[in-house]
Image: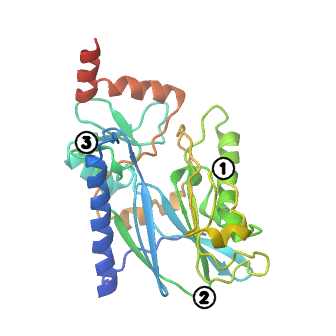
Amino acid sequence: MAAVRESKPGLDMAAAAWRKAFARAYKAMDKDLRSHATLDCFCSGSTAVTVLKLGSDLYMANIGDSRAVLGSRDGGGMVAVQLTVDLKPDVPSEAERIKKCRGRVFALQDEPEVPRVWLPFDDAPGLAMARAFGDFCLKDYGVISVPEFFHWSLTEKDQFVILASDGVWDVLSNQEAVDIVSSSPSRSKAAISLVEAAAREWKAKYPTSKTDDCAVVCLYLDGKMDQERDSTASMDNISLDYEGSAADPNEAQELQEPALTRNFTVRTVAGSAHEKALSGAADAAVGGGAACAHDQSWSGLDGVTRVNSLVQLPRFSEEKAAVG
């Protein structure tokens, strides 16, 4: 089961304030990336998903297709509820805005299922996102970092929220992810269990491709789940080391704060695990706006195509000429 809770038409004052706060934060992040001396984000960027829990309310924002999914009890089992909408070029309202800004949206022949954003004057860079941080080469052509905002009122049935990058959702469904987290022997192992499951699926479904970036955070909502089995059940965040292994519970008191890390790899082929039933809800929930994300598909052929395209962009052409 999966569902999308849209932003309420009449947001209360608190929700409206948080919507503005998220928008300001995302704008500041994008501005910081543009001005950062050591980061070149001209043709690279990132998706994002943010969740704020205040009492029984969840306030969320996202760009690109990093996603928030709720695990909720239903009878004797767990059901998945999708809390955010994937903001990709195939969402009609996103594609419409990109085209109004002279950007182009189409899929490559070898990847007909992956619509991408292209410059108006060249077949580059081919971004698979409609909103993202960075990717400034497309920011004048419909790609923006304005987040979409969502609100969810929690009930006693709601157990945890999974925040994950598209590398997870490309190969695992919402329900599969919730089942993996809910069956984890402990909270401290839930996130890494999901990452490992996604990595296995990448190898099984795309054996000739590299694994996409798989970043996961599990936010537990009630402080009770797995309490009898897990001595770290009081921790809301998952503490992982850089090898992706669970942190030693005995060392928890020595940490100033939980250390969240990312398992990272290079994106290759976009999966088809996104739930088609959400397409209608996505168009209704998205308010209009687009940006590209770092979650780009890199098949072997596409990698060559993209590199060749990059040198045709103005700044890359100048560098090439200078070297020559």
Q: Residue at x 66, y 70 (%)?
A: 252
Q: Nearer the viewer, residue 104 or 138?
A: 138
The residue where tag 3 is placed is 103
Give the answer, above or below, for where 247 lies relative to 16.
Answer: above
* Residue type marked 1: Glu
Q: Residue at x 45, y 30 (%)?
A: 109
Give the numbered dot on residue 156: 2
Q: Give residue 158's quadrant in the image.
A: bottom right
State the residue position of label 1.
243
Q: Name the residue type under label 3.
A: Gly
Q: Residue at x 29, y 53 (%)?
A: 32
Determine whether 246 is above or below 167 in the image: below
Q: Nearer the viewer, mark 2 or mark 1?
A: 1
Q: Secondary structure at mark 1?
A: loop
Along the horizontal axis of the image, is 287 left or right of 176? left
Of the numbered discs 2 and 1, the one sitting upstream in the chain is 2
